[in-house]
Every structure is written in C-alpha cells, then in structure tokens.
Amino acid sequence: MTRPKPIRYDRDTWLVMRDDKVLPKAVIRRYVDKGGHDQYLLIRWNLDPAERRLMAVCQSLERADELVRYDNHAHGYWDGPPNPHPAG
C-alpha cells in the first residue's frame, strides 16, 4: 500500500489523509523560525478544535508526513502494516 501524499490546502498548510476518506488524520503547518528555517508543526486533527494536539515539530514536510500512522487495531510493539516497522 502506498502512502497518500499530503493535500496542499494553502501556501503553508497540508492535510494528511489516512483511514478516513473525508476527515484528515492530521494537519501540517509550516512556520519560519527566527533563524529563517522552515519548521513543520504536526497537529492531530479533530473536529473539535479543543481536542487538536501538537504532536511534533519537524524539519521537513516529508518527516512530518511519515509520523502520521494508520489506525490499526493490533496493539503491541508494532501495529503492523501499513505502518512502518520501528526497526526500519
């Protein structure tokens, strides 16, 4: 299974789709830090804005996208495909 690419919403915002075809799993927002470098904030999406959570700050859009997992019902060390194995 190939991972869908983030959908560009505007100049600095991407929607990350996984299991649900309608609601995003996460949102990635790009900001520029005081050193002039891009920083990508990975935010867990929820319809209720009070339930949205900052999950990570990444150096690239690709890395932020990699951190968004699919929902699997298995629990343990590895959730299984299509999520990547932790060992690489």
Image (cartoon, rainbow, N blue to C red):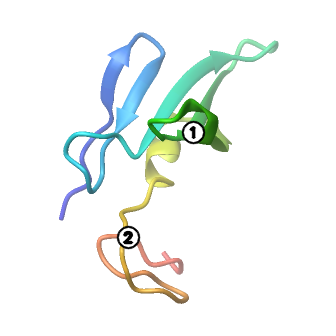
Q: Is residue 44 left or right of residue 35?
A: left
Q: Is residue 21 left or right of residue 85?
A: left
Q: Secondary structure at mark 2?
A: loop
Q: Is residue 1 left or right of residue 31?
A: left
Picture quarter with the N terminus: bottom left
Q: Secondary structure at mark 1?
A: strand
Q: Nearer the N terminus, badge 1 or badge 2?
A: 1
Q: Residue furthest bottom?
A: 76
Residue pictured at 22% horizontal, 40% vertical:
22
For residue 30, above or below residue 77: above
Q: CA distance from mark 1 to mark 2?
A: 17 Å
* Viewer-nearest residue: 36 or 10: 10
Residue ID for mark 1 = 42
Task: State the image coordinates of residue 57 (x, y, percent, origin top left).
Answer: 67, 39
Image disc number at residue 27: none
Quarter where residue 72 is shown: bottom left
Q: Residues within 10 Å of mark 2 (few under 14, many from 20)?
A: some
For residue 27, above or below residue 69: above
* Viewer-nearest residue: 63 or 77: 77
Q: Are marks 1 and 2 in contact (CB under 8 Å)?
A: no
Mark 2 belongs to which amino acid?
Asn
Residue pictured at 47% horizontal, 34% vertical:
27
Image disc number at residue 83: 2
Residue pictured at 80% horizontal, 15% vertical:
35
Quarter where residue 56 is shown: top right
Task: State the image coordinates of residue 18 (x, y, percent, origin top left).
Answer: 30, 52
For residue 30, above or below residue 69: above
* Viewer-nearest residue: 64 or 54: 54
Task: State the image coordinates of residue 28 (x, y, percent, origin top left).
Answer: 50, 32
Mark 1 belongs to which amino acid?
Leu
Q: Residues within 10 Å of mark 1 (few under 14, many from 20)?
A: many
Task: State the image coordinates of residue 77 (x, y, percent, origin top left).
Answer: 55, 88
